Amino acid sequence: MALSATQKEMEFKKPVRCILDVSDVEVWQKSSAYEDLMGFISALNDSVKRKQNSEVAAPSEILKKILSVLETLQSWIVEIPAEDDQVGRFGNKAYRKWQERLVERNAELITSLLPEGLAGAVVELQAYFTDAFGNSRRIDYGSGHEANFVAFLCCLCKLGIIEQSDSPTLVLLVFQRYIQLMRCLQKTYRMEPAGSQGVWGLDDYQFLPFLFGSAQLIDNGVIEPDQFPNDGFAQKYADQYMFMSAVAFTCEMKTGPFAEHSNVLWNISAVKYWSKVNSGLSKMFKAEVFGKFPVMQHFVFGSLLSFKPAAKS
């Protein structure tokens, strides 16, 4: 995972916004945080190459704890049902109650993951954790929120709580459970896509399931990229590959011909090899998520993910 844990005494601080205008994006792309996060995502991507979901190892104790936290968040959806008098396509106001509970209890949930000596890290971790599940004012969710969940996991890695050996399980169990939770939130509370590009975006809500999922499919010997847009095809393999699950969910949420409602994915299906799809999606992530001011302007920086320039190798 290429991120060494420093468990010596660290001075934790409340993270703050640093990407305040478009010119700050270039500074961010040269920062220590950018290097850490891209290295983390690349390592996770590499760890699941050629692995089906069923090939995942049993979770370590810390991953079990994270999964338990996600199950707790899932249970709140049942306890806080959508309001049935809601009008309009997006934004059921009951989501604000769900998010309010998250804000109230996030410190408690995060503390359950930390050894006693690192309890001070809550002040940094809760910023990423809270923003990982959408925005309560706009009742929306997008790839910037997804990036916050990855930042949360990255910080746990930097603290030495998640080990490098956890990487495949972190993707195929923990991250996948997070995606399942987010899909339930999106459907239950009709969350608006944050900064959606419509048919010109990869997906209305997520990005990384397609990246990690394409890594799984490299050299699979059965499924070719040009097959996944076919009616019912993605659903058939959704349990085995994250990419197919993401396509199946897109088809569930959208209507009409695939080429019209998901034009970028349709174009990706023309790429001959999954290895090319994977490398192309990695470049696209850097450009369309980490490289876009509207996506990254709300991201915050502290001591674990620093806005300071990356050390030159």
Image (spheres, helix red, strand yellow):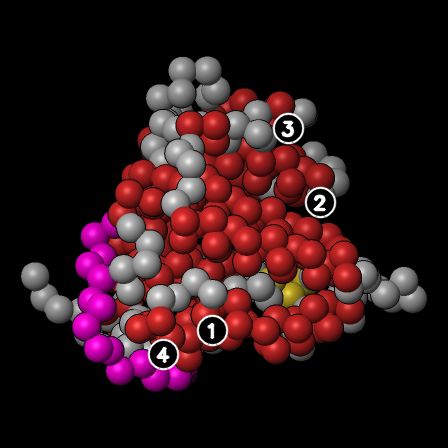
Disc 2 residue type? Answer: Met
Circle 2 sits in a helix, a strand or a loop, which is it? helix
The residue stretch that appears in magenta: 1-23
Q: Are marks 2 and 3 in contact (CB under 8 Å)?
A: no
Q: Reading the chain from its start, which is encountered first: label 3 or label 1?
A: 1
Q: State the separation of the CA atoms marked 3 and 4.
A: 44 Å
Residue 32 in view in this figure? yes
The vertical placement of 120 against 91, above or below, is below
Q: Residues within 10 Å of mark 3 (few under 14, many from 20)?
A: some
Q: Say the numbered circle drawn on residue 235.
A: 3
Q: Residue at x 78, y 69 (%)?
A: 94
Q: Nearer the viewer, residue 5 or 49?
A: 5
Which dot, 2 or 4, sits closer to the camera? 4
Q: Reading the chain from its start, which is encountered first: label 1 or label 4?
A: 4
Q: State the separation of the CA atoms marked 1 and 2.
A: 30 Å
Q: Reading the chain from its start, which is encountered first: label 2 or label 3?
A: 3
Q: Quadrant of residue 147?
A: bottom left
Q: Residues within 10 Å of mark 4 (few under 14, many from 20)?
A: some
Q: Reading the chain from its start, which is encountered first: label 2 or label 4?
A: 4
Does the magenta-highlighted stretch encompass residue 22?
yes
Q: State the separation of the CA atoms marked 3 and 1.
A: 35 Å
